[in-house]
Amino acid sequence: MNNDKSKEKQIVHVIGIGNLTRLDDGVAIRVVHELEKIEFPSGVKITDLGTGGVDIALIFDGWSYGIIIDAVDIEGLTPGEVVEFKITENNLPDVKGLSSSHGFDALIALKLAYVVSEFNLPREIVILGIQIEQMAGFGIKLSSSVEKAIPIVIERVDELIELYLQK
């Protein structure tokens, strides 16, 4: 049996985007750090993308499915509420409020990558957004309502990975 990981099929890539020093904006990175403690089957990769940006297209190039975890600030949501958006080349929803302390949100990067057409992007990308309570200022402590969302997001990521591995 060949144990060369570079030859494994790339099925699901999970990335977290955020800034640990910007209060609730660090929630996705905290989720990723918890996911890294779980032993997933081959074909699954977990990545802390930090503040992300246009690197998303490079990170997802060649993967069948992608999952993005990010903080959101969407009017009408309760702090800690988790929202989910599905993205395909033919379905690029206009989601206002993706965390933008990164300066270039995930959706803009994906739209650009689809237009450029030089990347082999996943057939489906899911964005799991966690509504923030506070992001003004600096600090590493999450709001309690946002921190409570971490296990919910981990459970949903696990469900999505199982679903994608069965396809």
Image: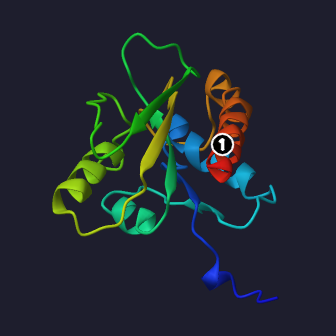
Instruction: Kindly tell me whether residue 31 is visible in this rendering.
Output: yes
Residue located beneath label 1 in the image: 163
Q: Give left or right: position of 51 versus 167.
A: left
Q: For this view, does 16 lie left or right of residue 157?
A: left
Q: Residue at x 72, y 51 (%)?
A: 35
How was this image coloured?
Answer: rainbow
* Residue 25 in picture, x, y percent from top left: 49, 40
Q: Quadrant of residue 115?
A: bottom left
Judged from this view, the residue extending furthest toward the left is: 115
Q: Amino acid at mark 1?
A: Leu
- Residue drawn at 35 percent across, 47 percent down: 106
As drawn, 10 above or below 96:
below
Identity of the residue drawn at 73% across and 35% down: 155
Near-viewer residue (111 or 36): 111
Q: Is residue 11 left or right of residue 115?
A: right
Q: Is residue 120 above or below residue 130?
A: below
User: Residue 96's x, y, as percent?
Assistant: 29, 28
In which image quadrant can residue 37 be found? Answer: bottom right
Residue, x 29% and y 31% (percent of image)? 93
Q: Nearer the viewer, residue 14 or 70?
A: 14
